[in-house]
Amino acid sequence: MSCINMSSLKILFSAALLFLVSFAFGQKKIGEPVNGKGPFELTVIVEDGDNRKPLESASVLLEELGSGDITDENGRVRILLEPGNYTLMVSYLGFETLRQPIIFQGPGVLRARLASSAQTMEEVVVQANADRNVKSTDLGRQVMSIETIEALPPFVGEADILKSITLLPGVSVVGEASAGFNVRGSSADQNLILLGGAPLYNPSHLFGYFSAFNTDLIQSVDIYKGGIPANYGGRAASIIDLRFKRGNQENWEGKASLGLVSAKVSAGGPVFTDKLTIMAAGRASYSNWILKQVKDPDIANSSASFYDLNAIVDYDITEDFSLRYTFYRSADDFQLVSDTTFNWSNQNHTLSLQKSFNGKLQLTLLGVMAGYENAILDESPFSSFELSSKIEDKGLNFGAKYFVKEGHDIGIGVQTKSLTIFPGEIISTNPEFPIDPFKVDTENATESGIYLQHNFELGRWIGISYGLRYNRFRLLGAASIPVYDELLPRAEENIVSFTEYGDGEVVKEYTGFEPRAALRLSLGENTSVKLGYNRMYQYIHLISNTTTIAPTDVWKLSDPYIKPQKVEQYSGGIFRNFANNSLEASVEVFYKDIENLIDYKDGATLLLNNNLESDLLSGKGYAYGLELYLEKKTGDLTGWISYTYSRSRRRIIGSFPEEIINRGEWYPANYDKPHILSFVGNYKLSKRSRLSAIFTYSTGRPVSYPSAKFNYFNGENIAYYDQRNAFRVPAYHRLDLSLTIDLNHQKKWLAGDLVFSVYNAYGRKNAFSVFFDDVPGSPPQAFRLSVMGVPFPSVSYQFEF
């Protein structure tokens, strides 16, 4: 009996020893013992175990304390702890939960890498970030994941970031085939679009039918309509910040898509070591075969093509010190009736260094080189020419962010850039019929800013975010600035002299102070009220007589006559979650005061004008609106409903009759659309199929109708416009449908998703604009232009390899 007992004791002792040893080896020691009293900071970095990409909004919980937090955009969370033994629980949608015992001795960093879960996204209800809209101070901000964007009905097989953004409240477009978009009653040039930190001056392909972004390389999209942090500047309405993914650090992987008019492919992985990764992607169109099927000879003889290229290189110098290089190029070529060609291109380079000190201090240095070019080539037999313009944007940004404690951080930074604009040059391309060459004077400027951003919480119920930003803009020579007769309207014939400035000499300087603030008051666990204020200046202006961004547009810097645009926005909202955070609802209101906005004289000459200020007018504007949003996040049916009521009006009153628009009365902006309604739905038909639908409705945009016509002695008829934007085109509405079938269950190489879609399913002939034809003896006759008035079906195949 004693032998048995002794054997049992040995087994028990061995098992206990084995358990203790395994537990000791399973525990991770964090930090080094520190003399002094805690608490100390634990930084947890949550990553995808397959590719080591940071996971934003992952839940990090300490079992013993019953508390934790969610990770930021870098996959980081910071928690104050007393030294001791803890069990860390890390969870994220679509990944296995990690349970990690730790021995916390002092300040340190823990990397938590999660394994992919066999569960589908629809089978998991995640609470980690479900209440972020209620608990954060974010106001007027929305984050769209690429998964959400790719689930929407595509246009001819292409998931589209910009079209997805326009389904959110407060965002609109003037009509079909619009290259730009309007945010809260502001013009399209007031949106700063950042791709990996570099600005894009034309974010579209094919006049707005496609976004110029390859979704395969985008991690997430941040949209700031209000509550804009102080580290962003240079535009007056919104920030669209697109962040690149990182290449897989473990294995090479790729993705491709093949559609009716375009195809794309991307691949990435480690190079020699998991510290160095690359990603590359390309996308190109082959749409001419569709144009050739059209019976209209003008369209059949036209051509349209585009491409874009991306490259991303990441190198981890140490665990807390990283380097990134990104490259982007896009190009479009559109030929109309075989004699006129429009082309435009973007090209960006960025180089960044990021250093973290013990998880508390993060330093970032970013260098940017961005460029945009456009050209018109006319190959008519007797007037062949090339008209081109260009922008060069070079910048250097330094930022430091200090994490004081959980929910409390401070950021400071310095940003500077140089801008060079070549407004326009025309040269002859046919020596037999030459035209006189002409070049508009080049513009040069520097723009710099310093900022402070402070975010903190006062207890559980109050969150405060405020920022201070100071800008300085300098227009530099060489320049020749006209001086106008003050007693006469500003016109080229009224120039009395010129003031000359040498290379690098300051022509005009503007400074601007931009306070930003947001306040959150929690009314419970599921409800909060938020208030916000923004002031922003803009020193670069899009000069265009079209309602959307076009390749003929001209960018213009502020000068002695054209002042920076200034926008002050006041906003507020109520945010509420229901049904255990599976339903998210919000109501937001805003009001904007706009100063120094630009409009044009009747008959203005915008191209190849060396005295452009003589055809431009400056005035004031205002915009206000109400935004409703309801999103269902879980279950077989997901999606959202958004509604916006907004008005955008302006008034131009100059010193002379020629400098007054609409008799000095307020009139709607070109993009004033009072009612906008969007329904977005995704329904899971089965484990391998999904039906998606989009319905959108909006008020027609304003247009000016001629009230009379005059017959001149030479027989020419001239239309007279009495009121600016006093009429509207008919209302816009459209239904898009798609069916996605998952073929991955076949376990075959190149198996993927087959997507069938229909754009404009019921063939609504939406009017983009209204034109007028001169009929002798009758008033001008109106004709509606519909860009795409028929259903447009498509099919695409997407697969991974």
Image (cartoon, grey):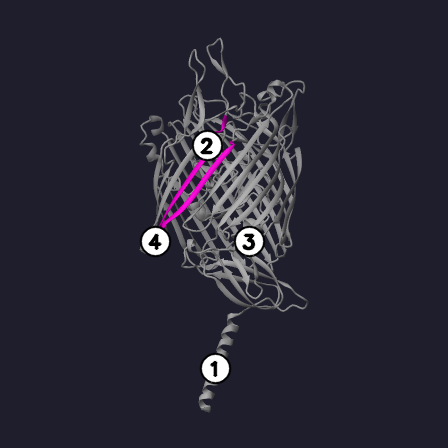
Distance of mark 3 from mark 1, alpha carbons? 46 Å
Q: CA distance from mark 3 to mark 2?
A: 36 Å
Q: Is residue 748 visible?
A: no
Q: Which residue is mark 1?
A: 12
Q: Earlier in the sequence, mark 1 or mark 2?
A: 1
Measured in 3D between alpha carbons, the distance from the residue under mark 2 to the one under mark 4, in whole angstroms, is: 37 Å
Using the image as rendered, state which of residue 508 and residue 433 is in the foreground: 508
Instruction: Examine the structure image and report whether residue 678 is included in the region drawn in magenta.
Output: yes
Residue tagged by mark 2? 175
Tell me, yes or no, whether the two marked residues, 1 and 2, touch with CB atoms within 8 Å. no
Q: Residue at x 60, y 32 (%)?
A: 622
Q: Nearer the viewer, residue 163 or 392?
A: 163
Mark sitting earlier along the chain (3/2): 3
Q: Main secondary structure of the magenta part?
A: strand
Quadrant in which residue 356 is drawn: bottom right
Residue 62 shows up from this direction? yes
Q: For the residue marked with disc 2, what is the amino acid? A: Gly
Res 72 label: 3
| Above-or-below relation of 385 to 143 | above
Decide: few, some or many residues near mark 1? Use Cα within 10 Å; few <14, some 14-19, many ≥20: few
